[in-house]
Structure formats: structure tokens, C-alpha cells
Image: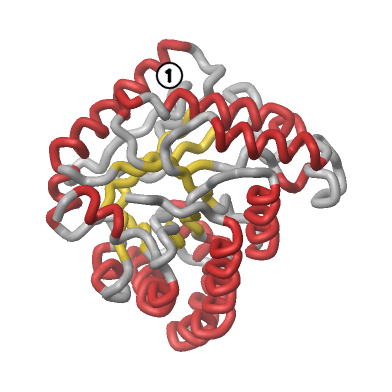
Amino acid sequence: MSKKEDFRNLLNDKGIIAALAIDQRGALRKMIEKYQEKPAADEQVKRFKSIISEELTPFASAILLDAEYGIEAGKKRDEQCGLLLSYEKTGYDATKAGRFPDILELWSVRRLKKIGANACKFLLYYDVDEAREINEHKEAFIERIGSECLAEELPFFLEIVTYDAKIADSSSAEYASLKPHKVIDMMKVFSNPRFAIDCLKVEVPVNMNFVEDYGQEIVYDKTQAAKYFLEQSQVTDLPFIFLSAGVSPELFNETLKFAKASGSAFNGVLCGRATWAGAVEVFVTKGEDAARNWCHTIGRENIEKLNQTLLETATRINI
């Protein structure tokens, strides 16, 4: 299969990426452990991923899974649903400054492609204001993955989560004031062709909880926020999609509508917890059948509302 064919397999019939993300590992374990006293078992993580894949992929253009716990879930996806696989280890090296990433030791882009991936996804934590030697290291790392994807003719999706090395709380008003600069300038960096990226998976450029009429504390008025969404769209020629960052389904839908009204030409979403987070408690406390029923009702409603919003807001990818 050619690179273009693989990319097309990730799109819906409107040329939009309406994808479901459940490549969480450490974060999913913590979500499970919130509702039980013992540590989350590997089999619990695998079973939950499989339930989400089997029940919700009929309504998604693609699903993002991980090669550690999500291989069986990938086999259970709907036959019309594309597959992205994560290439990074979960989390980052917390023993030193820089939030450095690493790849899964027993995997390669070739191996991801061999088991049916239509794209390789890699998560990078990146602070444009951090020391140059740190960012140079990260950029070289991404160049290597881009070269590997080029060699295997597999689309490369780079997910970038911004932060500030000096601000511990990324949900604070202090960080919200810096976020537009962090997100927009990061997109400028990784739009460079040397990285061989096919699609950027990014945060929205503001924290909507601090936008006028969306939160109690205002960091940006609506005019300022709209300018940031437009500027974000204008700094890249690459397709780009939004991650949900764990916000509620309602807020994520409103965010996409705000982005469209602001002139953003985003191309879809890879939406995770905003779609399926509510199923975790049901899965742990009531069992698999109850979790499937949640997916049939609330989960399906979440994803279908999101799909309708995407039809009204996202920009087609012509490939």
C-alpha cells in the first residue's frame, strides 16, 4: 500500500480525520485505579481498549492505539476504520530536565507497518523557550523518526504537547497566558520539511477555560482568542488536527465551533478521553457488559455529536 493510500484510510468520506484515540497507557492505568484499590492489571488495560475499539470504531474514521497493549484492540476495529499506532514509550524521562522521549524498544516503523498500521504516531513534549541544547536533541530525534517513516513509506503523525519548564501547573492562568506563543511557535518549528511530518496533532492555541464567556477567569477576550486560532492555522502548510486534552465532550465541541468561526482550517481530530472517559468507571465497577452498554448509548452519542461538529467545522484534506 502506498503512503497516500495509507493516509486516505485514515479519512472519512468527507476527507476529514474523525479519529478515536486510546493509546493511553500510564494515564489509563491511573483512571482505572481511581475506582479500585489494587493496581490496574495489564489484562484490564487491554480489555478496556478492545471494548472501546470494537464498540466505537464503526463511527470513527480511524483509531489510535499503542503497540504495547492495543494490538488485540486493533484487530477488533471496524473494517472501514484506519489504524494509527504509537511509537513512543509512555510518559517521559523525569530524572532530568527536558522531558526527553524514547521509542518502544522492541518496535520499529517497519514492524508497525507489518502489523497493519496506516500511520506512525509519536508524542513529543516541547517547550520552544527551553535551552537550545535540549530542543536540538529533540529535533534530531524527530528527524530520525521522519527518515524511518520515509524509508517505509508510512505517514508520520507528530503529536506535540507544549509546556513551560518553569511552570508546574499547565492548567493555570499563568501558563494560559503563554500557551498561544508556545503552541504557535512550536508548529512553525515542526512544519519544516526536514522532519518529514505528514500531519501535526496539536493542542488548540488557548485554554478555553480562560476565554471570555467560557470560563470564570478571563485571560483572553474572544477577539484575542480568535486571532490565536487564525494565526495557528496560518503558520503551517501541513494538515493539522486537534487533540481533546481530556476536556468534556461539550467543551471540545464548542472549541471546534469557535475554531471554525475564527477562520481555522484544521483538518479533524484525534479525540480520546472526551469520547470514552465515562466508560472507565462503568468498566471497573459494573463490568464489561455494562461498559459496552455505555458505549452503545453515551459513547456513541459523544462520537456522533463530534462527527456532526466536524462536518460543520473541519477542512477537507485533498490527498
| Quadrant into which the N terminus falls | bottom left
Name the spot of residue 142 as percent of width and height, x first: 32, 29
* Label 1 secondary element: helix
Q: Which of 107 and 282 is in front in this view?
A: 107
Name the spot of residue 184 as percent of width and height, x first: 57, 29
The answer to whether residue 73 shows anywhere in this view is yes
Q: Which of 159 and 102 is in front in this view?
A: 159
* Residue at the extreme top of the image, as rendered: 132
Structure colour scheme: secondary structure
Up/down of 178 relative to 275, above or below: above
Residue ID at (43%, 19%): 135
- In the picture, measured across the screen, residue 76 lies left or right of residue 300, that is left
Instruction: Using the rendered view, name the quadrant where residue 200 is placed.
Output: top left
Residue ID at (80%, 51%): 214
The answer to whether residue 36 shows anywhere in this view is no
Residue ID at (69%, 42%): 207
Up/down of 298 relative to 143, above or below: below
Name the spot of residue 302 as percent of width and height, x first: 58, 72
Q: Which of 260 and 159 is in front in this view?
A: 260
- In the picture, measured across the screen, residue 304 lies left or right of residue 178, that is left
* Residue at the extreme front of the image, as rendered: 318
Instruction: Using the rendered view, name the quadrant where residue 87 is placed.
Output: top left
Q: How crowded is mark 1: few (under 14 residues within 10 Å), some or many (20 or more)?
A: some
Up/down of 5 relative to 81, above or below: above
- In the picture, measured across the screen, residue 64 lies left or right of residue 289, that is left
- In the picture, measured across the screen, residue 272 lies left or right of residue 205, that is left
Name the spot of residue 190 as percent of width and height, x first: 42, 28
Q: Which of 291 and 235 is in front in this view?
A: 235
Which residue is tagged 1? 135
Q: Which amino acid does label 1 sit on?
A: Asn
Number of marks drawn: 1
Instruction: Using the rendered view, name the quadrant where residue 314 is placed.
Output: bottom right
